[in-house]
Image (cartoon, helix red, strand yellow):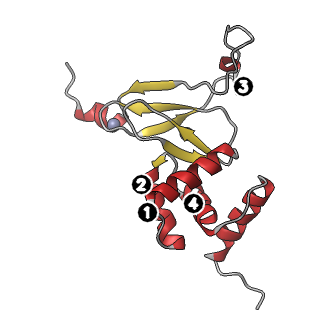
Amino acid sequence: MTTTSTTDEPMALAAARLRTAGMRVTAPRMAMLTAVHESPGHLDADALRERAQRITGHLSLQATYNVLRALTDAGLVRCTQIPGHPARYETERHDNHHHFVCRACGAIRDVECTVGAAPCMEPRLPDEYDTQEAAVTFWGLCPDCRAATPAS
Ligand SMILES: [Zn+2]
Ligand SMILES: [Zn+2]
């Protein structure tokens, strides 16, 4: 047999990504990485846990958070903290993109970075500060919610 089933392929890809990142390959990690990669992006831990469980069977909530933390620390997954929302996860593409959050329905969409670099990572701070992340979040109304809001 030389044919690979379509369900094995994403897992093999996930295993390769874990190895490249220098991580130990485990079933929960492969399943979670696949779940993040195959999701439309910006899912919270609960939603990802549900998807990963379809691949690998039961995953406790604690295991879910541990795996997501490890994948985030390894730079494979990007975690976005948005005030008032659970943390959202997506595949890390190192494109410095930002997020638009709808105040009404909580929908999140990517906003391309205008300059493509991260000048916001060079804040005017003394050298003693170790800046690790800069986040820009745009807030407003998505088109659906705008349409549903009567003009005042
Ligand atoms: Zn909305
Ligand atoms: Zn995003």
Q: Which amino acid is tagged 1?
A: Glu
Element carrying mark 4: helix
Q: Residues within 10 Å of mark 4 (few under 14, many from 20)?
A: many
Q: Are circles 2 and 1 on residues that touch, CB within 8 Å?
A: yes
Asked if residue 12 is positioned above or below residue 85 in the image, the reply reads below
Is ligand 2 less than 8 Å from the beta carbon at label 2? no
Q: Assign the C terminus to one quadrant of the image.
A: top left
Residue ID at (64%, 64%): 30
Please report whichever mark, 3 or 2, sits nearer to the chain's N-terminal start.
2
Element carrying mark 1: helix
Give the alpha-carbon distance from disc 3 to disc 2, as whole Å: 32 Å
Q: Quadrant of residue 17?
A: bottom right
Please report whichever mark, 4 or 1, sits nearer to the chain's N-terminal start.
4
Please report whichever mark, 2 or 4, sits nearer to the chain's N-terminal start.
4
Query: Where residue 54 sits: x, y (%)?
Result: 48, 71
Residue ID at (42%, 32%): 101
Task: Between residue 4 and residue 57, name the one nearer to us.
Answer: 57
Give the alpha-carbon distance from disc 3 to disc 1, as whole Å: 34 Å
Which residue is identified by label 3? 117
Mark nearest the camera among 3 and 1 is: 1
Give the image quadrant in which the ligand numbered 1 is located.
Answer: top left
Task: Point out which mark residue 50 bears.
Answer: 1
Please report whichever mark, 3 or 4, sits nearer to the chain's N-terminal start.
4
Residue ID at (53%, 71%): 55
Give the alpha-carbon distance from disc 2 to disc 1, as whole Å: 6 Å
Q: Which amino acid is tagged 3?
A: Ala
Q: Residues within 10 Å of mark 2 (few under 14, many from 20)?
A: some
Mark nearest the camera among 3 and 2 is: 2
Which residue is identified by label 2? 46
Which residue is identified by label 4? 32
Q: Assign the N terminus to one quadrant of the image.
A: bottom right
Element carrying mark 3: loop
